[in-house]
């Protein structure tokens, strides 16, 4: 089994910053791409940022330049540094990872989500 556990969400004022972390654990042989998604109330889940095993990154236009993504392969952890936060960034943030298990099978795993609320 593989688990992804997110942390770092919370309430922040507009213009503030938060750093999300997502640590993967379990029967992991390797982790391929990792990423962050978000789902605002009443809206569909959308991709926020992604990073490959080679550390190539991609971003949604709405967060480009504000939310750098990074990963620590030694810790099987992906980070999302969220700067200059806006009320429209309010959502539940989920991490995802493409994992090859110790048995050689590959799956996309998801975290449980962490709430980010941007409000004054």
Image (cartoon, rainbow, N blue to C red):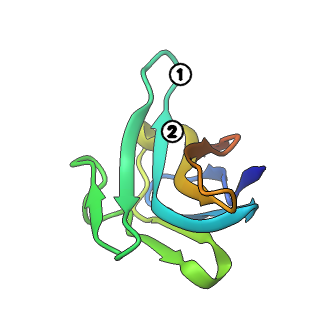
Hey, which residue is sitting farthest front in the picture? 103
69 with respect to 56 (left or right): right
Tell me the quadrant of the picture where the C terminus can be found.
Answer: top right
Q: Which numbered circle lies on residue 41?
A: 1
Q: Is residue 19 left or right of residue 113?
A: left
Residue 2 in sight here? yes
The residue sitting at 66% across, 79% down in the picture is 75
| Farthest residue, direction left | 61
Quadrant of the image occupied by residue 45: top left
Name the residue nearer the viewer: 26 or 44: 26
Percent x, y for residue 83?
43, 65
**Dot 1 crowding, Cα within 10 Å, few <14, some 14–19, many 20+:** few
* Total marks in image: 2
**Is the residue 31 above or below the residue 11 in the image?**
below
Q: Quadrant of residue 115?
A: top right
Where is 6 relative to 118, above or below?
below
Is residue 120 among the parts visible in the rendering?
no
Assign a secondary structure to mark 1. Answer: loop
Residue located at (63% from left, 68% from top):
29
Q: Residues within 10 Å of mark 2 (few under 14, many from 20)?
A: many
| SS at circle 2 | loop
In the rendered view, tell whether residue 19 sits above or below residue 97: below
Seen at 75% across and 63% down, the residue is 25
Alpha-carbon span between mark 2 and mark 1: 9 Å
- The image shows residue 67, relative to residue 43, as above or below, that is below
- Residue 73 vs residue 10, the one in the foreground: 73
- The residue that appears at 35% across and 75% down in the rendered structure is 55
Q: Which mark is drawn over residue 90? A: 2
């Amino acid at each position: 089994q593989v688990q992804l556990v997110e942390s770092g969400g919370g309430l922040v004022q507009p213009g503030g910053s938060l750093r999300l972390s997502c640590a993967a654990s379990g029967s992991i042989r390797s982790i391929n791409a990792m990423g962050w998604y978000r789902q605002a109330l009443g809206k569909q889940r959308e991709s926020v940022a992604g990073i490959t095993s080679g550390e190539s990154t991609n971003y949604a236009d709405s967060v480009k330049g504000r939310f750098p993504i990074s990963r620590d392969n030694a810790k099987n952890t992906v980070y999302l540094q969220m700067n200059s936060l806006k009320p429209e960034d309010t959502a539940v943030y989920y991490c995802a990872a493409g994992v090859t298990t110790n048995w050689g099978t590959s799956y996309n795993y998801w975290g449980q989500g962490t709430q980010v609320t941007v409000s004054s």
